Structures are given as C-alpha cells and as structure tokens.
Image (tube, rainbow, N blue to C red):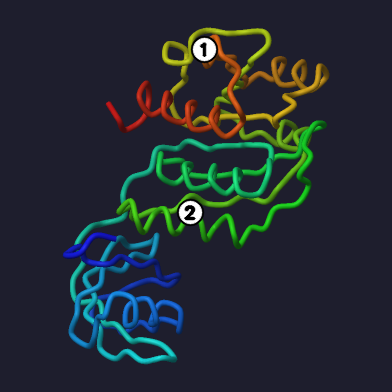
Amino acid sequence: MSSGRTPRLFVDEELKAGVATALGPDAARYLGSVLRLGAGADVLLFDDRTGEWRAPIVEIGKRGAVLRPAERTRARERVPDLWLCAAPIKRARFEWMAEKACELGAARFVPVVTAHTEVRGVKAERLRAHMIEAAEQCERTAIPALGEMQALKVLLRDWPEGRALIFCDEEAGGEPALDAMPGEPAAILIGPEGGFNADERARIAAHPAAVRVSLGPRILRADTAAAAALSLWQAARGDWR
C-alpha cells in the first residue's frame, strides 16, 4: 500500500455512523505496527452491505482496535449479475482465480466438481480471505458471494431459470465470446485442467440455458480461461462499457 493512501479494511458487520466497531488483534497489528497509525487516524471500512465509511481510530492496542464510522464515503457498488462457476484446481491457482473473480466484478464464485477434477476439497475460509484482500486493495465495496462446492450434474439440474450458462467450449468451438456473450443474469462455466469429458460436454451443450462460446484459437489454462472469460463478458455486457 502506497504512502499517503488511506488504508481500507473489511468488517463483517453492518456499519453505521457513530456506532463503534471493534477490530481484532491482526487488524490492530497491521494498523498500529505496520502502518504506524494511532488514535485519530482515518481508516476506510467497508462491510459489503452499506458501502464504505471513513472511520477514525478511537483506541488501538495489541489486543485490538476500536474505530467509529463518521461518514459514508461511498455506497455499495452495483455488481453485474454474473457468476463464475469453476472446477477447483491446485490451491494457489484456485485462490488466484477467486481473487480475479473479485477484481473483475463477479457477483458469485461457485466451485464445481467434474469428472476430471483432481482437487476435491476447497477451504472456503481461504478463498473468502483472498477475495476480501482483493477487495481491500482494489477499492471495491462488494465481495463475491461464495457458493458451496457442488457436483456438475447437481449444478445443471438445479440451474435457475432465466440465467444464461456460458459454456467456454475449447473443443467444439462456438461463436467468438466477445460477439456471443449473453446479458445478465449469466454465469461462466470453467472446467478443470483436463477439461470436461464427453458426457459432461454433451450434458452442458444440451442444457436449455447453455450458450457456447469460444475464447480463441489457443488452449488456455483454467485460471487464465476464467480471467479471460470474465474480462470479455465485462467488456461486452458488463460495466466496462
């Protein structure tokens, strides 16, 4: 974080003007020991509910800190209704994917188990922590919701009516993504490193909500494909226009 920039922290409680909020020892250590801030210094807090607030430090010590929101600086941003549904891959790369889902404006991140998924367990707390950190650094006032991991067949069976399912098909092609991206509500489906098997590909393609798109002539790694698809959707249908 550059000098002169007001630090931003997420708090998982609704913020209100004049109502003090307590931070734990980790946040207090960061503010006091790392940033050398003391009582009276301003911090920006956001809660993923009401927006961002200027909150001066009231008390700070080794065991925690108390801040009192004074004024709301920004309302919670409007987030395009776009989900990212992705098969878990190696931990560090899946956490990177979660970060990019936040940075690129996804509203929801859903881990999906497929036939070729090698990583069958994800640590929800770590994924959410990475999304929170991305939101703090990128000045977002909203954090993607984190869905429970579910099997692909369950995801397809329970798919919500009216939500487009963007199938990034690396084998059978499809219309160029920038031209074919549907509007919101929508969701991007990204497979594992081994791709979807033949049965899965047939099931996805036959789904009434499926929109098959191409991410170009090169085979992309799963995390790259996720970032590319999110960027293309935002450019074509989202809030980049």
The relative height of residue 21 versus residue 101 in the rendered view (above or below) is below
Q: CA distance from mark 1 to mark 2?
A: 28 Å
**Which kind of residue does numbered mark 1 sit on?**
Gly
Q: Quadrant of residue 85?
A: top right
In the image, taking residue 19 as reference, residue 30 lies left or right, namely: right
- Name the quadrant of the C terminus: top left
**Which kind of residue does numbered mark 2 sit on?**
Met
* Along the viewing direction, whichever of 236 and 170 lies nearer the viewer: 170
The residue depicted at 62 percent of the width and 35 percent of the height is 160
The residue depicted at 40 percent of the width and 41 percent of the height is 105
The residue singled out by tag 1 in the image is: 216
In the image, taking residue 197 as reference, residue 215 lies left or right, namely: left
Q: Residue 157: x and y, percent? A: 75, 32
Q: Residue 8: x and y, percent? A: 30, 65
In the image, taking residue 106 as reference, residue 148 lies left or right, namely: right
Say what secondary structure mark 1 lies in: loop
The residue singled out by tag 2 in the image is: 131
Q: Which mark is residue 43?
A: none
- Name the quadrant of the N terminus: bottom left
| Number of other residues with Cα within 10 Å of mark 1, as a class: few under 14, some 14 to 19, many 20 or more | some
